[in-house]
Image: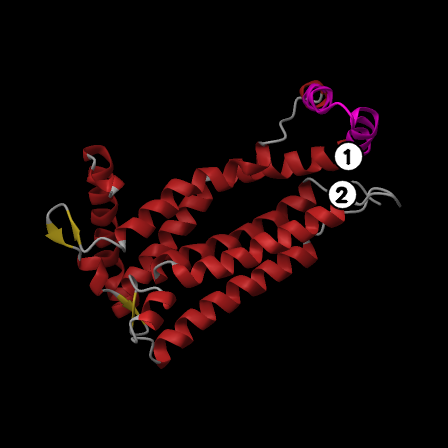
Amino acid sequence: MDLFSFAPLAALLDLTSSGLMALTSLLTPLAGPSAAAAAVVLVTLLVRAVLIPAGIAQARAEQTRARLAPRLREIQKRHRSDPERLQRETMRLYREEGASPFAGCLPLLAQAPVVGLIYAVFLHPTIGGQPNALLAEVLAGVPLGQSLVRAVTEGAADGATWLVFGVVVIAIAAVGELTRRLLRPAPLGPDASGPGIAAGLLGVLHYATAVVAVFVPLAAALYLLVTVAWTLGQRLVLRRFFPLPAS
């Protein structure tokens, strides 16, 4: 069942498609055949600019978690046999500090609807009862509605397809590796194993994004590339304003 068959979601899909087409027409004199790809990139940058306050909240939350890590470990040692008490005491500590353990999820949650809409726009052959003109748009000869997996299974993966998706996927993985190396949580003590585990999980998530880019339409893969690159740059800047405690 297509969720976008419901009237409110169908209207939102139509609005997104119309907006991308208008932006594509506006960028055509500058970007030529790649105008639709440029429109996706521009939309991504606009979304991330709007979410800068959420990024700041994320940086503050990361700093707070690092500062509270020794006290949180003490709570875990004290109440490890009582999960309910452990959760209660953990939340109490965050309340006392005026922080939330979920603040770091804001940028990801806020972007989810945008990614979903871009994904959906480049999957539907018709939108609003009209042929989806965006499916005819390309980047270096590769349709923006094509995914690498689909191209391979349909036997349509030519040299341009492998090149474009290869560049996007490798770039996402490279940004993920840079993020893992440059933003590794600072150790808070000789017995602090938590940051190492967190860094490992963070690295897995970044590489998972590169894997996802293989399965989604090229337009959505472009969104993922731009957003992970923005995230790295933004976090490097904000880390200067909200540094983690020194080891």
Query: What is the crowding at mark 2: few (fewer than 14 residues within 10 Å), some, or many (at least 20)?
Result: some
Q: Left or right of 28: which side holds 214?
A: right
Q: Position of residue 141 (x, y in %)?
A: 29, 74
Q: Please state which of residues 117 and 205 is positioned toward the viewer in this rendering.
A: 205
Using the image, tell me which numbered label, if any, was put on residue 194: 2
Query: What is the crowding at mark 1: few (fewer than 14 residues within 10 Å), some, or many (at least 20)?
Result: some
- What secondary structure is found at the residue carrying circle 2? helix
Q: Left or right of 193: which side holds 12?
A: left
The way the protein has been coloured in the rendering is: secondary structure
Image point (52%, 36%), residue name: 106
Using the image, tell me which numbered label, if any, was put on residue 118: none
Image point (34%, 76%), residue name: 157
Give the magenta-colored segment's residue range.
Answer: 69-92
- Residue extending furthest toward the left: 129
Inspect the magenta stretch and tell me whether residue 227 lies in it. Answer: no
Question: Which residue is the site of mark 1?
Answer: 69
Q: Position of residue 144 (x, y in %)?
A: 30, 63
